[in-house]
Amino acid sequence: MKRPSIPQAPYSGSCLCAAVRYRLNARPLAANACHCMDCKKLTGATNLLMLLCERDAFVHEQGEVERYCKRADSGNAIDIVRCASCGVRLWHEPLSAPQLVFVAAGTLDDPSWVVPTSHIFTRSVSPGVVIQDDALVLRDGPTDRAALFDAFKRVYGA
Ligand SMILES: [Zn+2]
Ligand SMILES: [Zn+2]
């Protein structure tokens, strides 16, 4: 497939009711799709698509949020951050990696350029999902998050 090029930062985003707004001041480090069963429940969709970003480049500009702490099978905890008013899930803060933030790609004001560069937990992928030829595909989770960053760099350049 032909991927759209990634526009220059910053990227802005909001929830459905627009009470919460955020800005991302740097290009993401990865665009990762997760197909695990928890992510299906979490999103209400067949998979989750997140931009892995540097925490320093992320700004929560306005709006009250609520947090739900989810513990993964790995034992790692992650704060899932939602709009306190409309409940839209906006970003995740991995407590084991406070230098990162994971932004829910669909909440960007312009999500048209986001195409996954990696797919994880494809052992439970839903049959309707398209997997790009150039994306990294892992049956289970990555042993190291660097693999997801490397996949992004390989596709889009450093
Ligand atoms: Zn909202
Ligand atoms: Zn998942």
Image (spheres, rainbow, N blue to C red):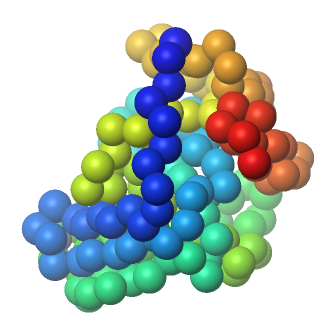
Residue at the image position 56 percent from the left and 76 percent from the top: 57
Which quadrant of the view contains residue 135? top right
| Vertical order, 130 against 143 (above or below) | above
| Vertical order, 41 against 107 (above or below) | above
Quick one: 2 or 77, which is closer to the camera?
Answer: 2
Quick one: 138 or 110, which is closer to the camera?
Answer: 110
Which quadrant of the view contains residue 11? bottom left
Residue at the image position 66 percent from the left and 37 percent from the top: 156
Residue at the image position 52 percent from the left and 13 percent from the top: 1
**Where does residue 81 sit, x and y in percent of width and height?**
41, 73
**Where does residue 84 sit, x and y in percent of width and height?**
23, 80
Q: Is residue 147 left or right of residue 101?
A: right
**Where does residue 107 sit, x and y in percent of width and height?**
31, 56
| Vertical order, 30 against 63 (above or below) | above
Q: Is residue 4 left or right of residue 146?
A: left
Q: How many marks?
A: 0
Residue 149 seen? yes
Residue 118 seen? no
Which quadrant of the view contains residue 125? top right
| Vertical order, 83 against 151 (above or below) | below
Residue at the image position 32 percent from the left and 56 percent from the top: 108
In the image, farthest residue toward the left: 17
Q: Is residue 102 left or right of residue 95?
A: left
Q: Is residue 123 left or right of residue 23?
A: right
In the image, farthest residue toward the front: 8
